Amino acid sequence: MPDSADKDVLIEFVRIGNSVKVSAIDPATGIEVSIVGPSNMSEAQLSSNAIAKLRYVLAKNK
């Protein structure tokens, strides 16, 4: 479950065959990251992974 710091993160799921592309977007900066995971993985797990990558990129760009 995303914490309160992730309220403004936009998440998009696109199924591509046996995979799902998950994009996480920070609306304040416009920075977008994507991950690809298996379609049998839960949306919560996929979201969590995408948000973790977004946090990493945002911290790296500070």
Image (spheres, grey):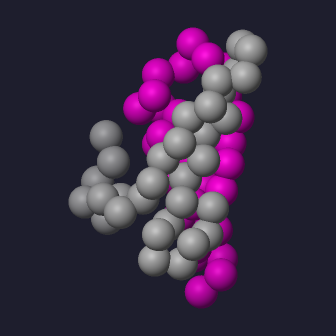
Q: Is residue 4 left or right of residue 43?
A: left
The x, y position of residue 60, in whole percent, is 65, 77
The x, y position of residue 36, in whole percent, is 70, 34
Residue furthest toward the bottom?
62
User: Which SS does the magenta portion mostly show?
Assistant: helix
Residue range in magenta is 33-62
Query: Magenta stretch containing residue 9, yes or no?
Result: no
Q: Residue at x 54, y 19 (%)?
A: 41
The x, y position of residue 59, in whole percent, is 57, 76
The x, y position of residue 9, in whole percent, is 42, 58
Is 25 in front, or is 45? 25
Is 34 in front, or is 58? 34
Position of residue 32 relative to residue 46, above or below, is: below
Residue furthest toward the right?
17
Quarter assignment of residue 61: bottom right
Q: Residue at x 64, y 24 (%)?
A: 15
Position of residue 62 relative to residue 19, above or below, is: below
Q: Residue at x 55, y 53 (%)?
A: 24
- What count of labels does the image hold? 0
Does any portion of residue 14 appear in the rendered image?
yes
Quarter assignment of residue 20: top right
Quadrant holding the N terminus: top left
Q: Residue at x 60, y 55 (%)?
A: 53
Q: Is residue 22 left or right of residue 19?
A: left
Residue furthest toward the left?
4
Does any portion of residue 49 appear in the rendered image?
no
Quadrant holding the C terminus: bottom right
